[in-house]
Amino acid sequence: MFFLRYPEESPEKLLNFIDESYSKVRILCLLKTAVHLDLFDFLENFKSAQELSSRLEIDLTLTEYLLKVFRELDLLEDKIEGNTNYYKNKEVTNIYLKKNSEYNIINSLQYYFDDVKSWENLESILKNQQGFPSDIQTFFPEVINRMADECKRWELPKILNEISKYKEFKNARKLLDLAGGHGLYAIGFSMLNEDLKSYVFDLIPVIKQTDKFIKKYKAKNVFTIAGDFYNDDIGMDYDVIFASYNPGGKNPQIAKKVYAALRKGGLFVDKQFFLKKENGLDDYLNNMEWNFSKMKGLKKGMVRFTFKGDLDLDSYLKYLKELGFEILDTVSIQQLLGFGCPSAKMIIAKK
């Protein structure tokens, strides 16, 4: 009889996988709710679940469990006085999850929450074989705030300090931040070298956002140039050209333009993702998400962060040398930051 038989293979592995996946989804929902409630903004000092429940006007029992979860995730610390638990933020939470922190990642988190909605709509995406169009004129302005938040909290100062070691940078007077988006690198370089004039080159809708960052940080000697680097002139006589995670960063056509625009002895600093091969689950998921949309005006490759005409790392380095560049260094961004994507590299080349 059916009730007396069981399959040859146990469902344990499958059920454990489902349980683990479900737990991670629940944690993401908890984090989303906490951010929307500004919960971490109220926990700079120790508070009880009762105090927090009253302040936020939320259920007491659920508040108690919510705080316990974040304690287990090492986002909160607690103490017991009498029979009451009190909770407050760990320092990492104060830095990255409070809205009044300059280094908060809340905008970045919101994009994760929004991206989850795309996965919930996966069936429609799979059935729409033409892909959902995304216009570069609107796409890039939308993401630069996220990119600004992501870079300034750790990567930005690390990169600035690394490049500032080069005498070519110390002696530079004119810098181009190519497809510079938010312009934070140009702003930072100008702070490190007060004799430097920095220019951020990007699309017209993006430049409008760049100007806001320039104004916000009261940046001197930082200017914008509107254009499409595939089709427009990018200028001449630069001492340094910097590029960070932009669509043309591995493209021979753009590299040729960069070489022509640099003074002899000038530096080309190019920070890009060079994925050698897909390596397991995370890469497969990331590459699926990369292909959820088709970008009008820009031909994306199959693999995340790749575009038509891109070269792999070895081929790109070879091409730079053929143009006349001397490769001074190829820096692992993962090693520089202490974490991150192993495929991210920063090429430092001299004309």
Image: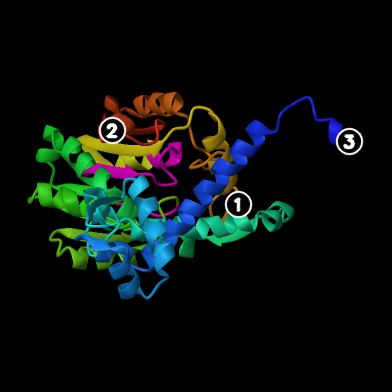
Whichever of labels 1 and 3 marks the residue nearer the N terminus, that label is: 3
Q: Nearer the viewer, residue 233 or 205?
A: 205
Mark 2 vs mark 1, CA separation in Å: 30 Å
Snapshot quadrant of residue 172:
top left
Residue located beneath label 1 in the image: 292
Numbered circle sitting on residue 338:
2
Element type at mark 3: helix
The answer to whether one can see residue 199 in this image is: no
* Magenta residues, start to end: 231-255
Residue located beneath label 3 in the image: 2
Element type at mark 2: loop
Residue type at tag 2: Gly
Q: Nearer the viewer, mark 3 or mark 2?
A: 3
Residue type at tag 1: Phe
10 Å crowding of disc 2: few (<14), some (14-19), many (20+): few
In the picture, the quarter occupied by the N terminus is top right
